[in-house]
Amino acid sequence: MKTSKKKRGIEAISRRAGRLFILPWEIGMVIFIIVPLLISVAYAFCEVTFKVGGMDYHFVFLDNFKYLLKEDPYYTDTLISSLTTLLYTIPIIVALSLILGIVLNQKFKGRVIMRAVFFLPVIIAAGVVLDILTTQINGQPPVIQLGATSTSMSEGGGYLDASALLAGLRLPEAVTGMMSKYITMIFNLLWQSGIQIILFISGLQTIPDSLYEVSKIEGASKWEEFWMITFPMLRDVTLLVTVFTVVEEMVSTSNEVMSNAQSMISGQQRYDMPTAMIWFYFLCVLIICGIVLFPIFRSFKRKWD
């Protein structure tokens, strides 16, 4: 009895210590994430006006959403454009990250350097280097073009202006435009795949080598190894990468809905209509992800488990 009481005492102390350690995170979660999130939801259903000493809220229920869908001449088009871009960029980024993760997980000379090269855009995008590369110097165009406002990736806008690179080839204008569009798109997708590649590499390193040794003994091909071992074992990582990519694409500066909402907040000092735009967009993305991802991963789980 004394031993069991002692164990319970140690476990209780450990639980209390654990709660104490995560208490600052929980407080920060409530103050800086949950409360602003609930306030933004309230903005979407209200007409917000400024007054002396604060803001005035007038509950309008669904009027903001009705205006966006029925009267706003631009929101529906930008919403469809953003959702379309999201639908084709996410599968490409996830598949590209998986392929590059498998390649970079192999044993070859210089693999550390190659991993650093693919992860380099993440470091550049978070520092002052990106500001230097995207700033005009002495009237010259920047090295990297950020198509963040009105030009979507599908129209050729993004992190790289490939037209300048192809201008010296003296190709027909139609060919140059098409090549510029696809080169820019590929560069943008590679630029956004750094963290996803790292996640896939970490997932690949958790797969036991014994599974591949057994598959070689059984005479399985590389293609069979991928579908029977690699991909099933990366199921949870693939879901994580997919969700991360969806969130990253939603808040990207190249997203037309987000950029328009940001312009309204900073330029017109409005908080009601922009939050309604963002929340309706989030709802559409959530529904699409649920329709597409839930049946796929549920069927895969039944098959693999």
Image (cartoon, grey):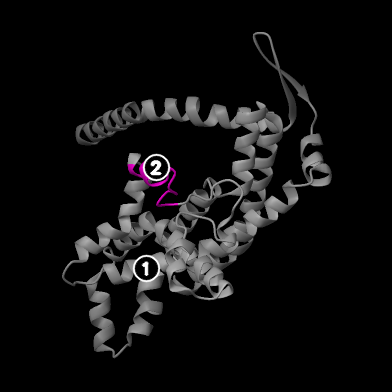
Please tell me which residue is depicted at 32% across the width and 70% down the height of the picture: 102
Please tell me which residue is depicted at 39% across the width and 42% down the height of the picture: 137
- Image quarter where the N terminus lies is top left
* Residue 70 locus on image (x, y percent): 83, 45
Please, which residue is most extreme toward the bottom here? 219
The numbered mark at residue 95 is none
- What element does badge 1 sit on? helix
The chief SS type of the magenta part is loop
Query: Crowding at label 1, few (<14), some or many (≥20) Cα neighbours within 10 Å?
Result: some
> What type is the residue that disc 1 sits on?
Met
Q: Which residues are magenta?
A: 129-144
Hey, which quadrant is residue 227 in on the image? bottom left
Looking at the picture, does residue 161 appear above or below residue 250? below
**Does residue 95 appear in the picture of this structure?**
no
* Residue 37 locus on image (x, y percent): 58, 32
> What type is the residue that disc 2 sits on?
Ile
Along the horizontal axis of the image, is 138 left or right of 179? left
Residue in the foreground of this view, choosing between 51 and 58: 51
Residue tagged 1: 233
Indicate whether residue 213 is drawn in magenta: no
Please tell me which residue is depicted at 68% across the width and 51% down the height of the picture: 79
Indicate whether residue 135 is drawn in magenta: yes
* Residue 174 locus on image (x, y percent): 59, 73
Residue tagged 2: 137
Looking at the picture, does residue 57 appear above or below residue 90? above
Q: CA distance from mark 1 to mark 2?
A: 49 Å
Along the horizontal axis of the image, is 243 left or right of 43? left
